[in-house]
Amino acid sequence: DSGVTQTPKHLITATGQRVTLRCSPRSGDLSVYWYQQSLDQGLQFLIQYYNGEERAKGNILERFSAQQFPDLHSELNLSSLELGDSALYFCASSVDIGGAIDTQYFGPGTRLTVL
Amino acid sequence: AQTVTQSQPEMSVQEAETVTLSCTYDTSESNYYLFWYKQPPSRQMILVIRQEAYKQQNATENRFSVNFQKAAKSFSLKISDSQLGDTAMYFCASLYFGNEKLTFGTGTRLTIIP
């Protein structure tokens, strides 16, 4: 158990809908990262939040957005869902105290199926 | 752009044997870390081992060790005395100071045969 929690574990929805994925980082970790794992794209970095602020953006679609709340949990919002958005979405967290590279620890993932 | 390459899509070995998974990476950075993550059938991403680029000594974690060849930009994972629970996808990944996104390879599916 990495200490990172994600809910829900599974999500099945229809095209055009909107969903929210939730992540709670390890205790003391300030940074949260979101990754998407799909069959055709592999593991791709989406976005990073540090202590409530967006720090880095990767291959995140405009239909997707994220935020990190004062208690440091994060939510990834996916809207106008398409079949191709079906994937495993991971959240990871790290201490990120600055001045060094930190290991990222992953949550169990949320499997999204868009029908 | 940073790239990580895993050239072995699938491997299989007998239980108790030793297996080596290959990984090469491309970077012009000097301050970086390299990782091996394991993804068993449960799909959880589990950290196996970490190597800091500035360290010359190869990292070791129990039955897992790496062969880090900095000049050749090679970072292979050796699993000794393989066990059935080692069956998983293994991903090599890199992380650079100032760019905190992990860049992953395409993975190697390892099967341990009883």
Image: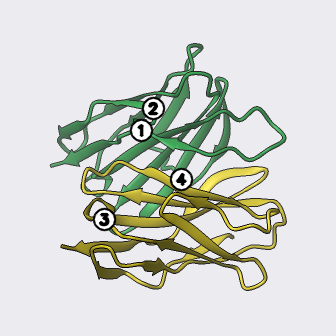
Chain colours: A green, B yellow
Mark 3–mark 2 distance (CA, rounded to whole Å): 26 Å
The residue that label 3 is drawn on is B83
Residue A15 at what x, y percent from top left?
21, 45
Residue B31 at what x, y percent from top left?
82, 60
Marks 3 and 4 belong to one chain: no
Category of crowding for the residue at label 4, using alpha-carbon neighbours closer than 10 angstroms: few (below 14), some (14–19), many (at least 20): many
Mark 1–mark 3 distance (CA, rounded to whole Å): 24 Å
Q: Secondary structure at mark 4?
A: strand
- Quarter occupied by residue B65: bottom right
Q: Secondary structure at mark 1?
A: loop
Residue drawn at x 30%, y 65% is B83
Residue A107's label in the rendered image is 1
State yes or no: discs 2 and 1 in contact (Cβ < 8 Å).
yes
Category of crowding for the residue at label 3, using alpha-carbon neighbours closer than 10 angstroms: few (below 14), some (14–19), many (at least 20): some
Q: Is residue A93 left or right of residue B63?
A: right
- Tag 1: residue type? Gly
Mark 4–mark 1 distance (CA, rounded to whole Å): 14 Å
Mark 2–mark 1 distance (CA, rounded to whole Å): 5 Å
The residue that label 2 is drawn on is A4
Q: Nearer the viewer, residue A80 or B16?
A: B16
Q: Nearer the viewer, residue A24 or B62?
A: B62
The mark that comes first in sequence, 4 or 1, is 4
- Tag 3: residue type? Gln
Quadrant housing the N terminus of chain B: bottom right
Q: Which chain is home to disc 4? A: A
